[in-house]
């Protein structure tokens, strides 16, 4: 049942990624042409700022998901967790709305100058949007705790379709920058509101009761959320913000090639998130039910799938990178393929972090998880200066990959310690679990070489190779028996 739901939910969320990617390719030129470069820059900045501002929930939504998942079937526990989390979220929402008011007061009194008025208005609107969405995001935690990812996938598709259809219509009707930013904010709020309405209509309650607020539980949530906030910030700075780092170290001219690689790697990260996020709640639920072996095996399943997808991405970039970069950004950037393949190995570490984070949180190891996440960023910063000096922008890539692979080993070592095993035994089971994907890669490589001898057009050959991989991966996911033995069946603890 879990695998069937997993395949359906993941497929739906991948459809959402595809819609968003294709729509964005068509939408961006239209917005640029209509708004002009300056207002387009503000609009693009607004999209980035939303991601930054969502970090300001201080990990409350993640903490709420963790406790709800571990309290499956405990209605009183759910009310206590949601009510206490709601109080924290209202405090944060109030602070953001206060900042929005102060920003507008500063702008209207001329303290910021007239030149910054459009940007100030956009930031104010985004502060209001995020402030209102923080309490509503707790109902997304409920859907996650109930493993209702299929429903969340439909809500995500609705949000993407409304955004991609509405913005061109507003521009066609003569709307400007503030009109499309306001519309985008309303669509984002509708996304979270749909989750609240779904929970309320089904359960006929908001799950919030003032009398259920527990100060001791509130302290637990706050203690947990502060470590989740550290983890979230570290994950955000894993590679997405390195454009600024490259610009400072190597100059603005080096930013463009690095930014191109970040876009590609971030697309892979979104796919990994869709595949692996499904298992988070199940891991926490097993731990909350006193089933540590089941939690461990589910974590290994998430790790296995994530690492498999990361390896497939690296293989496909090595195979198709030149062609893809030439078609997308021009032949002058095809030289980035080797560096891009190496950069994609960051996703192997990302898969490990995505799998082990809910496992560590379920076992009350959130502090260790936060140290691992932030330690990886600190190590990268220590390596990046000397490596960038020697290798240029590729040195930034090397620093990130070295840091993420080292901390992959440290994460697996912590898992081994928690189950009384050794790092070597843990590496052995992980290798055994990815053997089917390694065989799939060998098969895809053989098909690619064979097709190269037939004289087929490049596009047709690539399509066939990708089809072989997609069919093999889908068959693997739909057949749990192919995903390897459980942790205890191979005597890792011996």
Image: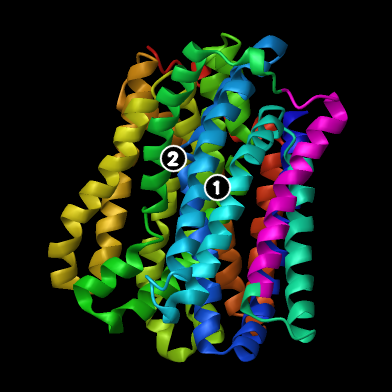
User: For the residues marked 1 and 2, what is the alpha-carbon distance in whole angstroms?
Assistant: 16 Å
Q: Which residues are magenta?
A: 179-207
- Checking the image for residue 452, the label placed there is none
Side of 393 where 190 appears, left or right: right
Residue at 54%, 78% (x, y): give it: 324
Q: Is residue 390 left or right of residue 482?
A: left
**285 w.r.t. 14: above or below:** above
Residue 8 lies in what quarter of the image?
top right
Labels 1 and 2: the sequence-earlier one:
2
Q: Secondary structure at mark 1?
A: helix
Decide: few, some or many residues near mark 1? Use Cα within 10 Å; few <14, some 14-19, many ≥20: many
Q: Which residue is mark 1?
A: 437
Quarter of the image for residue 82 reads top right
Q: Nearer the viewer, residue 337 or 60?
A: 60
Query: Is residue 337 on the magenta stretch?
Result: no
Q: Is residue 316 visible?
A: no
Residue 183, given in percent of the width and then of the height, sits at 71, 66
Q: Residue drawn at (66%, 40%), measured in percent from left and top?
A: 136
Quadrant where the N terminus is found in the figure: top right
Residue 201 appears at what percent x and percent y?
A: 87, 32
Q: How many marks?
A: 2
- Residue 146 visible here: yes
Q: Which residue is mark 2?
A: 352
């Amino acid at each position: 049942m879990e695998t069937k739901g997993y395949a359906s939910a993941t497929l739906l969320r991948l459809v959402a990624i595809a819609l968003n990617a294709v729509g964005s390719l068509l939408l961006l030129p239209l917005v640029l042409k209509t708004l002009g470069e300056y207002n387009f820059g503000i609009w693009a900045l607004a999209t980035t700022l939303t991601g930054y501002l969502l970090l300001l929930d201080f990990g409350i939504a993640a903490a709420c998901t963790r406790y709800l998942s571990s309290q499956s079937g405990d209605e009183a526990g759910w009310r206590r967790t949601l009510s206490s989390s709601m109080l924290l979220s209202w405090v944060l929402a109030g602070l953001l709305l206060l900042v929005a008011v102060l920003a507008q007061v500063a702008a209207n009194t001329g303290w910021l100058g007239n030149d910054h008025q459009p940007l100030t208005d956009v930031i104010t609107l985004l502060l209001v949007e995020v402030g209102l969405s923080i309490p509503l995001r707790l109902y997304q935690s409920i859907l996650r705790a109930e493993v209702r990812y299929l429903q969340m996938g439909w809500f995500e598709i609705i949000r993407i379709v409304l955004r991609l259809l509405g913005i061109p219509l507003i521009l066609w009707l003569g709307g400007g920058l503030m009109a499309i930013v306001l519309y985008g904010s309303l669509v984002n709020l509708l996304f979270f509101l749909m989750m609240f309405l779904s929970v309320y209509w089904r359960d006929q309650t908001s799950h919030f009761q003032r009398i259920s607020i527990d100060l001791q539980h509130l302290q637990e949530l706050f203690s947990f959320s502060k470590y989740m906030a550290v983890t979230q910030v570290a994950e955000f700075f894993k590679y997405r913000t390195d454009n600024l780092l490259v610009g400072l170290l190597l100059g603005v001219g080096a930013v463009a090639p690095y930014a191109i690689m970040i876009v590609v790697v971030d697309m892979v990260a979104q796919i990994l998130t869709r595949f692996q996020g499904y298992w988070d709640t199940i891991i926490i639920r097993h731990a909350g039910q006193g089933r540590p072996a089941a939690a461990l095996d589910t974590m290994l399943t998430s790790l296995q799938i994530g690492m498999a997808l990361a390896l497939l991405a690296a293989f496909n970039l090595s195979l198709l990178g030149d062609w893809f970069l030439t078609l997308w950004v021009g032949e002058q950037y095809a030289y980035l393929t080797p560096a891009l393949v190496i950069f994609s190995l960051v996703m192997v570490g990302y898969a490990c972090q995505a799998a082990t984070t809910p496992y560590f949180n379920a076992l009350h190891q959130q502090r260790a998880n936060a140290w691992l996440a932030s330690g990886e960023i600190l190590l990268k910063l220590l390596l990046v200066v000397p490596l960038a000096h020697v290798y240029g922008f590729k040195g930034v890539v090397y620093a990130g990959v070295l840091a993420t692979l080292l901390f992959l080993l440290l994460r697996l070592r912590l898992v081994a310690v928690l189950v009384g095993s050794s790092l070597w035994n843990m590496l052995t089971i992980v290798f055994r679990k990815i053997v089917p994907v390694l065989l799939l890669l060998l098969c895809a490589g053989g098909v690619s070489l064979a097709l190269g001898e037939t004289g087929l057009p490049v596009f047709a050959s690539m399509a066939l190779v990708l089809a072989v991989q997609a069919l093999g991966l889908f068959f693997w996911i739909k057949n749990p028996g192919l995903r390897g033995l459980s942790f205890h069946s191979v005597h890792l603890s011996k």
